[in-house]
Each structure stands twice: as C-alpha cells, then as structure tokens.
Image: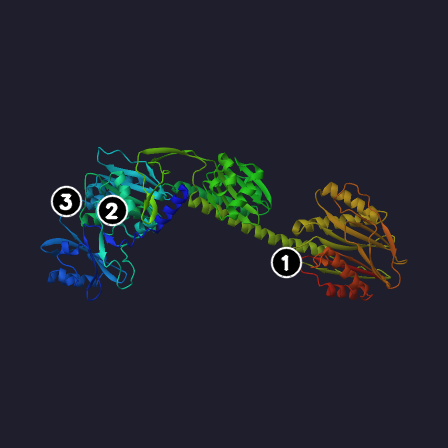
Amino acid sequence: MTASSVDADALLRCADEPIAVPGAIQPHGVLLAATEPDLAVVVASGNAEAVLGRVGGTLDQYLTDDDAARLRDALAGDLSEVNPLRVQVGGADVDLVLHRADGLLITEWEPVAGAEEAGAAWHTRLPTVLQRLAASSTLDDLSEVLARDVRTLTGFDRVMVYRFDEAWNGEVIAEDRRADLEPFLGLWFPASDIPAQARALYTSNWMRIIPDAGYQRVPLDPPVNPLTGRPLDLSGAMLRSVSPVHLEYLANMGVVSSMSVSLIDRGKLWGLISCHHYAGPHRPSYPDRVAAEFLGRTASLLLRTLVAAGVTDGVVEVARRTAELTAAVGRTPRALGTALTGNDPSALDLLPATGAAVRLGGQLMLLGTTPPAERVVPLVRALLDGGVTATDAVSTVVPAAADLASTASGVLAVPVGGEDFLAWFRPETLREVTWGGNPYQSKTAQTDDGPRLSPRRSFAAWSETVRETSRPWRQHEIAAARTLAGHLAEATLNRAEEDNRLAGALQRTLLLEELPKVPGVALAARYRPSQDDVVGGDWYDLVPLPSGRLSIVLGDVAGHGLAAAAVTAQLRHALRAHLLRAEGPAAALDGLNEVIGALLPGEMATVVVAELDPDSGDVVVASAGHLPVLHAAADGAEYVMEGRGPALGVLDAPSYRETRLRLAGDDRLLLFSDGLVERSAAGLAAGLDALRDAVGAGPAEPQQLLDAVLAALNPPSTDDVTLLGVART
C-alpha cells in the first residue's frame, strides 16, 4: 500500500469517526440518562457510584426531596432556562445540567468543587463588557474585546479569535495571552485541524470544554440506548468524550486544558473563540462558561453588521454602476455592445477587475487586460459548462488555464443567452501565508482498526507564498454581474421580438397584394411564413416589361430577421430597375451582383428569373445559385438545369448565363424556395423528386397546382415557403 493510499484511508476513517456517539464521557462529571416520566436511570457513566454515591434507581433517589421537586418542576418548562440546577448530593453542591436526546432525559452532574470562578464582581461588570462589544466599530475591535474579556472571565492562559475562510482554513485574528507565551496572532491553521464533522457539532453546540486533556475516558453502561439499540447521542452533552486525535493534537501543542465557543453568522460557523491553558488542568465554573458563551452569542449577532461595514463602500459603488449600465442598456437596445464598451462607465468599471470580456451576438469585445482573444471564449465556456460562476483560482477548475495567471487567476463569468456572456478577470495576487506548522506534513498512525490521521507535532511558524490565486469575488459583485446579464438578456429578447415584428411588416410590403393581370398568362403565388415567428429572406416579384414580356422572380437572402428583410427590400427594388433596362435576365443578374458588391458587401442571396413572352410561350431563364425551375409538360416534369450560376455576392463578375425553353399547351412552370424541399426528412434529393412527381401528376391550372403541391409535400413550418406557378391560357 502506498503512502498516499494510507493517507486517503486515514482521512476516510477520520471522517467516519463517531465523535457524536463516543460511548464515554470526560471524568469531571457524571452522566445519567433516564426515561420519563418515571425518571428511571437506564444509562449511567462508570463513575456514577464514586461521585454520586449510588448507581441505578430513579433520579429522585439521588436528590433531596426539595431538589427532586425542583427537578420535576423544571422538566415541565424550557430546560435551557433552568440550567444549571444547583442541587445537593452528599452535602456537596453539584450543577445539574439537563437536555433531551434519543427519547431520554440526559442529566449531567458536575461538582462545583474544583471549578475556578471569576466571582460575582466580574458578573456585575457584564453590562460594561457588552457595551464594549456593541461599541466596536470594526471586526478587529470586536475580536480584540472578545479575546481580552473572555480571558479575564475564564482565566485561560491564551484566548484567540479564530476566523474560517471559504476552504475552512482558520486565521487567528485576535489574541490575549500570558506574557511569556509566543504569539499565535496572524497564524493560519489548515482545515484538516478541524474536520467537517467536528465543525457540524460546533454549529449545533456553542460550547465545548476539556478541563484536562490527559483524562481517562469514562464509559457508559450500557454503551447503547435501550430504547433504540444504538449508541447514545452525546452531541449536546457538555461531558462528551472527545476524539483521541484531538487530544493528541492538544498534547502536541502543549495544551493541558481547552475550551471553545462558536461564532455563528446567520446559521453558518464563522469562527471560534479558542481558549488554551498550559499550566495544568483548568475548569471554569459552569456560570462562567455560560457567561463566555453569552459573549460569543452576542458577538455573533454583531458579526453581520461589522463584516458588511468593511465592504459597504464597495457595495454602494457597484450598485451605482449597475444602475448606470442598466440605464445605458435601456437607452440603446440596438447598440448593446456600445453601451457596455464605448461609454463611461463601461462593463470593466462595474467591478474591481483588470479586464473584462463582452460577447453579444457572437461578437467578442475585450476591455482592459485580458487573456488573448482566442483563449477567452474556451476559458469562459469551460467555467460555465462546469457550473462555475466565479473562482479566484481558475487553474484549479481549468488546469489548462494555469499559464493565464498573470491576467486571469480570478474569473467571474455570467451567461447572457445562447453562447453570449459577460466575464471579468483578475490577475494573481501573491500572498505570504504563515501557518502554525507545515500543513502539508500529514502523518498517519497505525491502530488496531487500521491507519488514522496523526496530528502535526510542530506548530512553529511555517511560511509559503500562495500563487495562482486572485483577490476573491464578493457575493455582491457576483450578484451585480448576474443582474446586468439579466438586463442584457431581457433587452436582447425584447429587441429580437421587435425586430421580428418590424421584419414581418417589412416583408409583407414586399409581397404583392394581388398578381398583375397579364393577357394569355395564368399566375399563382403562395407564401407561407415560418410558424416560429422567424422572418426569412424569401421574396417574389412579377415585373411587366415594356416589351410586353413578363419577368417572374423568386429570391432568397441569406439570414433571418430584420437585417435579412432590409437586404431583401433593397435587392428587390434594385433587380426591378435592372430588369426594366437590361437585355435579358442574365444581364439583370450581373447588374444586381454589382449592387451587392458595391453597396452590400458580405451579403449573399440566390435569385432565379424567368422571362416569359406571353404570345409565343418562349421563356428565358437565368439563375444565381437558386434551386432549378421545374418545367412540367404533357410527358412529365423536369428541372431546368442550364443557365445556372453562382449565388449573388460570391464572385465579383460571374457573368451569368441564360437558357431557353417554351411553354406549349398545358405546360406549367414552377419556381420555389428551399423551404419547400430542403427540410424533407429524407434529404434534398428526395424532396426534389417528390416535388417533381407532385407537379407532373398535378392539375394544369396554377392555383390548383400550388395547393396540390403544398398538400403533397407538407413542408415543415420551421422555414418560409414560397411558390410561383405560371401557365399559358
């Protein structure tokens, strides 16, 4: 077995150690568990007879008649309000402490003799101590008052205020100590010093004391609760025997007696008041311990205000900038990128950061000092895909980003919608951390039950430089980022809805309200918009020419929405002008391609033009990348494959070509957009075959033919569908 596997096994054993049900107590008192209402003793600690003079029976038998009556009266109320119940046992004063657990009344009997008392004089000064706590204007002031007054009250050699960080490492932020002791102020202690299960007990049980760390544990008899058959729950017992590992830890530090009081902020363990005694066993009286706990509870109530006071200015400033950026977004919904990157304040000014990234509509904009542009999107995507909004050590989440420490040790990223996001970056902040002993020198000890953790033996100051870690992100900063992203997402959605409405209105203006009346020609048109409310680039037109001929046009602009509709409008009108003066469809397409190159660079469209002579039935066809025209005659339907060139906007001067055919008798010509055939489940080729079959077997009259084609192909409603039918009468 390797050393690492032994350590892992030891960690698991430590995590599983039954510290809440140790089956034993410390020897400075006696524990009796009784049933109610008969008060029959069913569990007793092994020292009961030696300390109380008897074992078994009922609780009444341990007490005088008056004390027994007081006990029964107390059981009818709130037990915490009567603790401790001072009783006489064998002529000696005993503090009786009560609570309920596992269906039993748990009684703890602590002799008053042997306990050190601060005396009544100190308790008369308690209001003054509380005033000092309440008057503390900073966390440092509160911690110093707390350490000094708890030490004065309890008489311990050293009292520390110990604060946890996010990883449960602890820092000593205040200390009052005997003059000859080396200071612990400023030292850090690793999270492994206080395992998770111990922290859980600290959260539920405010006070813990070990008067003599060298004690011999006193077992319970029987070791299990007779009502449940399980070990008795001692998590709420002040006499609970503690983990041997913890006792060894104290011994390694030279601590003979210890006490701790929890500091809890809004239900979460924030820190500890940790008390150490080195001169020998030390047991403050129960009333003094309660007073120390009271100070801890009072300080806990003040924590939220004092911790928040340290960041109030930052909270207000971030809130102000959030409001300003939100207002800018509201004023310029069609220029969101400019609102966040081109104004003052910008997205970079929202939070304390050295760099920011704004990705909107697929366009990435960088501000300040950031990772290289090609690294930003993969980094942010890795964080968001992993469910991480904020990290101050990005290399622990995305190991491949370790080389970005100088610009992005800390990253805060929030999604805006789709692939868009906002992100802020912080560089690494080198920190010198001084630990109470080397936290990386974990030890294991072999026991009969296998390996277990053995605490450090040296607590000499050990320093290290922490790298690849930035200043941490605060909750109000994360909340502000999410708020801004939410406003952006809403603005983007509103803009998209408005664009669709405008595009729909614009596209409707491009559709002919009624088809022109051309003698000798039967015309029909069908336009079916997408049911997803996404406006496409389809358009059609029928342009009577001065020569008496008729130009039949069907086009499709790449893209969707308002931009596509606007381009469609420009191309439709430009093509009309070229058709009126050009010598045929091919020349008109050449001219339209020049328009795109000069005025609409980057745009692309497909168009097919069929120029019909109503008298002769001659048709001239030219296509710019569009699907072929379908010619149906008496012997079947065939696609017109000649006269086809590249899409508009692809080449500078493609020189389009023409092909000729004739409509005779009941011949029909069908022009259509890709929405009719491309979304076929079987693919484009199958869609084209199905259309050819439907037209070949369809009626001759164009209106009926188009209805028959739509019924036969039943194209999906996810795209626009446009059809034009032409026949001679």
Q: In the image, is residue 561 above or below residue 704?
A: above
Badge 2: few (under 14), some or many (20 or more) residues near its Cα, within 10 Å?
A: many
Identify the residue at horizontal 59%, vertical 51% (top origin). 495
Mark 3 belongs to which amino acid? Answer: Ala
Disc 3 marks which residue? 121
Question: Residue 242 versus residue 76: which sits nearer the camera?
Answer: 242
Of mark 2 and mark 3, the one earlier in the sequence is 3
- Quarter holding the C terminus is bottom right
Badge 3: few (under 14), some or many (20 or more) residues near its Cα, within 10 Å?
A: few
Mark 1 belongs to which amino acid? Answer: Asp
- Quarter holding the N terminus is top left
Q: Residue lying at the far left in this picture: please name it.
A: 91
Left or right? Give the position of 427 relative to 259.
right
Residue 118: percent from the left, percent from the top? Answer: 16, 44
Q: CA distance from mark 2 to mark 3?
A: 17 Å
Contact (Cβ within 8 Å) of mark 2 with mark 3: no
Of mark 3 and mark 1, the one earlier in the sequence is 3
Q: How is the image coloured?
A: rainbow
The label shown at residue 324 is none
Disc 1 marks which residue? 532
Disc 2 marks which residue? 295
Residue 451: percent from the left, percent from the top? Answer: 35, 46
Badge 1: few (under 14), some or many (20 or more) residues near its Cα, within 10 Å?
A: few
